[in-house]
Image: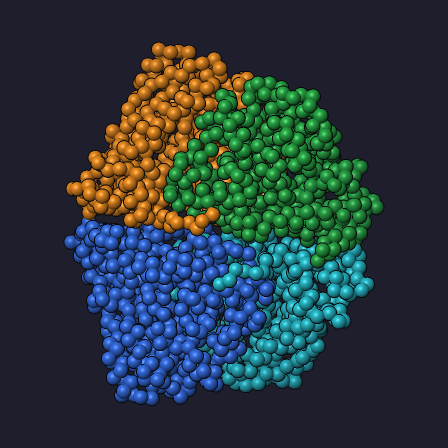
Chain colours: A orange, B green, C cyan, D blue
Amino acid sequence: MSKPTQTDPIFTLTTGPVDSYPAVLRALARPVLYDYDPAFLEHYENVSRKVQKAFASRTMPVILQGEPVLGLEAAAASLLAREDVVLNLASGVYGAGFAGWAKRYCAEVVEIRVPYNEVIDPQSVADMLKARPEIRVVAVCHHDTPSGTINPVAEIGRIVHAHGALLLVDAVSSFGGMEVYPDTIHADLFVTGPNKCLGCPPGLSLLSVSDAAWAKMKANPAAPRASMLSILDWEDAWRADRPFPFTPSVAEINGLDAALDLYLDEGPENVWRRHALTAEATRAGILAAGLKLWPASEAISSPTTTAVRVPEGIDEAVLRKEARRRYGVVFSSGRGETLGKLTRIGHMGPTARPIYAPIAITALVGTLSAMGVAGLDLGAGVTAAMAVIDRDL
Amino acid sequence: MSKPTQTDPIFTLTTGPVDSYPAVLRALARPVLYDYDPAFLEHYENVSRKVQKAFASRTMPVILQGEPVLGLEAAAASLLAREDVVLNLASGVYGAGFAGWAKRYCAEVVEIRVPYNEVIDPQSVADMLKARPEIRVVAVCHHDTPSGTINPVAEIGRIVHAHGALLLVDAVSSFGGMEVYPDTIHADLFVTGPNKCLGCPPGLSLLSVSDAAWAKMKANPAAPRASMLSILDWEDAWRADRPFPFTPSVAEINGLDAALDLYLDEGPENVWRRHALTAEATRAGILAAGLKLWPASEAISSPTTTAVRVPEGIDEAVLRKEARRRYGVVFSSGRGETLGKLTRIGHMGPTARPIYAPIAITALVGTLSAMGVAGLDLGAGVTAAMAVIDRDL
Amino acid sequence: MSKPTQTDPIFTLTTGPVDSYPAVLRALARPVLYDYDPAFLEHYENVSRKVQKAFASRTMPVILQGEPVLGLEAAAASLLAREDVVLNLASGVYGAGFAGWAKRYCAEVVEIRVPYNEVIDPQSVADMLKARPEIRVVAVCHHDTPSGTINPVAEIGRIVHAHGALLLVDAVSSFGGMEVYPDTIHADLFVTGPNKCLGCPPGLSLLSVSDAAWAKMKANPAAPRASMLSILDWEDAWRADRPFPFTPSVAEINGLDAALDLYLDEGPENVWRRHALTAEATRAGILAAGLKLWPASEAISSPTTTAVRVPEGIDEAVLRKEARRRYGVVFSSGRGETLGKLTRIGHMGPTARPIYAPIAITALVGTLSAMGVAGLDLGAGVTAAMAVIDRDL
Amino acid sequence: MSKPTQTDPIFTLTTGPVDSYPAVLRALARPVLYDYDPAFLEHYENVSRKVQKAFASRTMPVILQGEPVLGLEAAAASLLAREDVVLNLASGVYGAGFAGWAKRYCAEVVEIRVPYNEVIDPQSVADMLKARPEIRVVAVCHHDTPSGTINPVAEIGRIVHAHGALLLVDAVSSFGGMEVYPDTIHADLFVTGPNKCLGCPPGLSLLSVSDAAWAKMKANPAAPRASMLSILDWEDAWRADRPFPFTPSVAEINGLDAALDLYLDEGPENVWRRHALTAEATRAGILAAGLKLWPASEAISSPTTTAVRVPEGIDEAVLRKEARRRYGVVFSSGRGETLGKLTRIGHMGPTARPIYAPIAITALVGTLSAMGVAGLDLGAGVTAAMAVIDRDL
């Protein structure tokens, strides 16, 4: 209960939690309604319909009352049956990590693994499905955030769908920041959250569930029911005339409501464009300044996260601490295998605006230079970033 | 996405979610920090220490990132081992309901059941423990909210402790509204939440865990790990120098911080006193108006919820709908077996102030009279409530 | 800088400042834009158009950057010329008080005075105008808040207009709570504010100015220019392409924006109806409880304020202090000549909802009974209030 | 009432209104208390004491309920007597502009004028006072914001004080951003506001009044009383046991309270240091990029505003419009004689942090280059700014 010793940061340029839009913060402060108040029941249905609109999905979404790791764990527990063979596509820490949950619930987990700075080749999926035709479910992480790389989910989705397996997609940190619609990519269970590109605080999972996935979960005797891990419990919870399995997170729903209004009013294409442009400008600046990107190519780099290789001899934890101390700018570290090897700049929601590219470059290059990395060219970095931004204006 | 058709209520006099304190609502609107920002890490430790202070506990608490049903399910999953015999004390819908979770995780659930308008007799617990000495865990719901009754947990705790079993207490809707300290009542796993008497929105669970409970969970091979249902994952998460198992609900933590400041600054005794006085005045008014309480006696009535029997011939759902339509006042229904039989008035957090007693009485008696219940005396009800309030002024 | 010793009130049932609507409070927390930011310029024009719509006026309104006493002082300073004879209608403290400002700016102030619990007889105005045909301006306070009485401004307006004089109306605490449109009542300078029935904090004046009033002010060499007291400076300030004379109160404009949305969305008629009903129920309850109203008749009683005579032997300041201490309910005192003689209950904005009638009656009658006033019947009071409310449901 | 067509800016780097600190925005959303509520009366006294502490003044401050132009107009109206000879020091648009108010209230206004990119030489004041010993009041603008220059008020104050005249200081945009204490500089009437370096919205004036100034105002028969322009009315308004002349702006007082807490908790010296450093880094970057400063020397440049000369052939209005359209960054224009000749970058309150220097340089240089100004070196600008920032880290 001692007084805080830490000052607040100035810019949180992380990959999540990201700072929320001001309108979202104000929405969190709305009066808290009783969950069975008719005004809240109607509100919850309205918010659910907005999620559906943002998903452009035929089916109604499910909102789970916990940050997206809940959505992913619940997906594994609900969709995977004891006898299933599951193909897990592991191109990064999060994608690989899903196998941990999957193994608890199915008979066998087959994997395709690539280095964590590359992405999955769709052909390798097709080959594996041919080799192991009994595969029932394929799991893929769209944006493996700890690597800042984007898997080709649309191509993978076509192959999986043609094979007749179900596709489980972790789109937590891509949805809302780039084009990815669950139905279009043949995702049967699509998990995302409002706390990345939609600019909300963490606390909810947003799921899109295909008819086939609903059928498989209902037929799965091991699928959780009467549990925090249940998806089935929430099937009809969006309806104003149906009960909730347990109390929804009223304030988070209010925040999500405001975030969806912002997203739909601005226009998804416009939102994606500023994410992509911010990332492109950041990459250009990073490279021009003399630093290296983590992803093997720009083509597979995420529009919502730029992962920068840490120069030889630099302690990455110190790098982030110094950037914050010197300039008030907060970056994300790597995770697991990428921890210490890269620093990540988030372009998500409110920070996915081009002017944040020179800010990030300035803070990152400034810190590294101050830490003794020679030969970095801050001026060239900022100039290159601005050239990208100015190109389209 | 149609426009709302429901106007907002004026007074939410429910048993949770309750409306939040204004200071809590504003705290929800604080900037969202990155969870690994040193300012947030320090903040999280500070909030944890405030929870510990409110618990007056020797051990550090655990904050789980979901409303208290998560805390209860996680408690069952973590504390109960496959071979355990568990005694579940069922004096209401919530207490009885815990058996559903318990049965998934242990060898046998023994129960003591009493009518849902009565409470557990401690002697019956002593007798059962003598009869079934192999009982390892006893579970009790302190305030069975759907009945508005308070179980004698301190006495039960003494008996259970003397027997050598562990006590699991659901104090979700009592903690913060009346005196109940985990260590004092010998609770080994104590589950509550900020969304009742602390006046926060739903979205977190607060747990106090005794050393014995930690030891039992660690020794339990079935206790969830790397899961939303895990308590073990969070053991050291309160420490600023330790990682989180997954992203905490930043905004909810901010709200909790403000709520704990309010609670500790006002003084727990003062907070409990206004809960008790509001409830006592409400009961006096309800009785004087000609209505009946649900609990078998006032002595076992909750200071945070007043459950009122629905008069003969009245549809309880219509009653609540009418109270809201006519006066903008929202009450809670019963749950499960008590649904339709009683209406509940919450006295929790911001509404636990005596002046809400005449409001609740006016709205409830007014509605019932308008619905055709003869012989109710609103004037007598309000006057009796005021007599209680004025008594101590 | 000592810690606050006062707890916050529970219900602020005052005649202004009134507590603001939650949506207004959140709007005050919007980011503060630069006043010459194109987004703010557009916003200011939009808010001005909403004021015009609420005024249903042919002319664009003026927003002055100070609470309505600024509007009234500026009106006197701007509209009244050195040579003018002004008729001031004094039926209460505020109406009479306007003469203080008027005398500074004009040749002569003529007055019609009635006791402060009565209102102006329009015939007396007609008679005066016949007797003193040189009267150029007539000033009237629509709702003399310290008395809780409503002057017949529509009838007075017709007479003044027919005479050819200009009408200056103080509608500060009536507008937004009852039907009163500047054009309809022939008001040439109409002054109100958002801090009463619109449910905003104090800090702005809203003026409607007729073409004739603009002409008179422009022709008035003494009308302030380049001054906080100027109305002329602000004539075109509503236009997005025109400069502000000085910086507008950005946050208050944001709050006003939200308040106007609430007012126009709910529908003015609906808003007025709940003000009237709350006042009627309050009066019924006050009378039935055995207290007396201040206004000479219910017909002239305000729908936004109920002024209650203080019983013999009661110190009114103690009464209010006790009501707050005992029940957390805050009332307004009288002002000037009415100070000590009456206590006022506000029905403005968020508290203009019928359920606040029994709350006010309970707190007021409860306090007076506790202070030793014999013979009051709280039960009868609440019952009578509820009968009014229930009548139309 | 059409939908907004303007998107919100990303960074408001203006000279006021400036964006407010998040904690101030949340404070604006506190419940609105009745001004005579004992909790508000105590609060108002507490806030007044915090202002006094920030002023480090022997006397209690006056808070006027309107943005600082009210404070300045009221100062002229209150302090200047009909017979006074006033010396006005005009080194910029604001300083010169004060003569307009002064002339209304005194016998003669003497002026010392210097070009608007220079500041007043204290010796010239001494000379003038010798030449015109009857001068009773000297008025000076500390920071003439439209020029971004700082007058040497401490030296001027010593001279004026020694002469026996009173000193009226406009410290609106310097106080809170640099060291300037009313008593230390011998200011008799010191006018500032919370809407610049304290990071509040516009709507209040903060005045420090010496005993001599109180005496002079009280002796001045023309000093406004019972008026929005009165200072005298508010002399004792800070006392919890005294009435307000009219309703204070409750929400703005709440915002001010939070801003003062931030200021005093961070420590004034620390706050000033980050203002100075941000300005120094900005100037270094502007110069290195090939642009010119408006002030004749860096020594007289403001730590809270950097005024940049507009390059030949550039339309300054287009410059600002483009900076906003391209990068979401908002700058301030000049005013009056400086309009069109310079663009201003504010370093006030939340934006007075070094990292904003490279942001401002990037947006300004980027825009000018895009508009066709040749030879600017963005890289050199950012690098030079960072060198200043890094110097002290």
Above or below, D260 against B278 in this view is below
At a point 34% along the width and 38% down the height, the residue shown is A332
Question: How many tags in the picture?
Answer: 0
User: Percent from the top left, x then y, of residue D61?
Assistant: 45, 71
Asked if residue C24 lies left or right of residue B359, the reply is: left
Asked if residue A250 lies left or right of residue D74, the reply is: right
Which is more toward the observer, D234 or B172? B172
User: Percent from the top left, x then y, of residue D5?
Assistant: 41, 51
Which is more toward the observer, D70 or A68? A68
At a point 37% along the width and 64% down the height, the residue shown is D176
- Residue A18: tell me if it is visible: no
Asked if residue B151 lies left or right of residue A264, the reply is: right
Q: In the current view of this chain or complex, which residue is farthest to the right? A: B375
At a point 37% along the width and 81% down the height, the residue shown is D166
Which is more toward the observer, A178 or D126? D126
User: Percent from the top left, x then y, of residue C19?
Assistant: 58, 58
| Quadrant of the image occupied by residue C153 | bottom right
- Residue D117: tell me if it is visible: yes
Q: In the current view of this chain or complex, which residue is farthest to the front? A: B162
At a point 68% along the width and 63% down the height, the residue shown is C322
Above or below, D241 against D315 in this view is below
| Quadrant of the image occupied by residue B315 | top right
User: Percent from the top left, x then y, of residue C291?
Assistant: 77, 65
Asked if residue B169 lies left or right of residue A156, the reply is: right
